[in-house]
Image: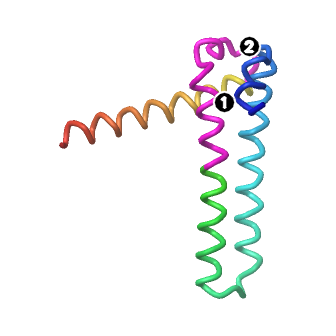
Amino acid sequence: MGRAEDFSKYSTEEKWDSINTSMRVLQQEETAFELRRRLNTHHHPKQIQEETRRFRMDQWIKWCEVKDLYAEHRDELADTLGDESYQTCRSILERIFTNELDDALRKTLEE
């Protein structure tokens, strides 16, 4: 059973908790990566570039999963249950969706 199937069985609060946790983990990983980059200045530029590329790809995959789960359950997740952290998550996700839609429309109009 995949994460999407498990996620759909969650209550609204469990869904928000899962999304909030995932977003917090992504931010913590970003902070840790940036700290490692600053402390490990002795690495060869090519090695730094490859590490950064791998990290960004991994982050992108995780981020896409969060966005997909949110998109699939967007109507239900409109209710943030009055929780400020959930409202913050929803704001970020909605801003991203708006930006992606704007970019897609702009690209279509340019063609």
Q: Residue at x 75, y 67 (%)?
A: 35
**Residue 53, image x, y percentages:** 59, 67
The quarter of the rendered structure image containing the C terminus is: top left
Residue matched to label 1: 89
Mark 1: which amino acid?
Cys
**Which region is colored magenta?**
61-84
Q: Residue at x 58, y 13 (%)?
A: 75
The quarter of the rendered structure image containing the N terminus is: top right
Residue 66 lies in the magenta stretch: yes
Q: Is residue 38 shown left or right of residue 101?
A: right
Q: Residue at x 79, y 36 (%)?
A: 21
Q: How many marks?
A: 2
Quarter residue 93 falls in = top right
Residue matched to label 2: 82
**3D distance between C-alphas at marks 1 and 2:** 12 Å
**Residue 92, image x, y percentages:** 59, 33
Q: Is residue 108 shown left or right of residue 55?
A: left
**Residue 2, image x, y percentages:** 74, 33
Q: Is residue 107 shown left or right of residue 81?
A: left
Q: Residue at x 78, y 25 (%)?
A: 6
Quarter residue 3 falls in = top right
**Residue 66, image x, y percentages:** 65, 36
Q: Callout 2: few (<14), some (14-19), or many (20+) C-alpha neighbours within 10 Å? A: few
Mark 2: which amino acid?
Gly
Q: Nearer the viewer, residue 55 or 7?
A: 7
Residue 30 lies in the magenta stretch: no
Prevalent SS, magenta region: helix
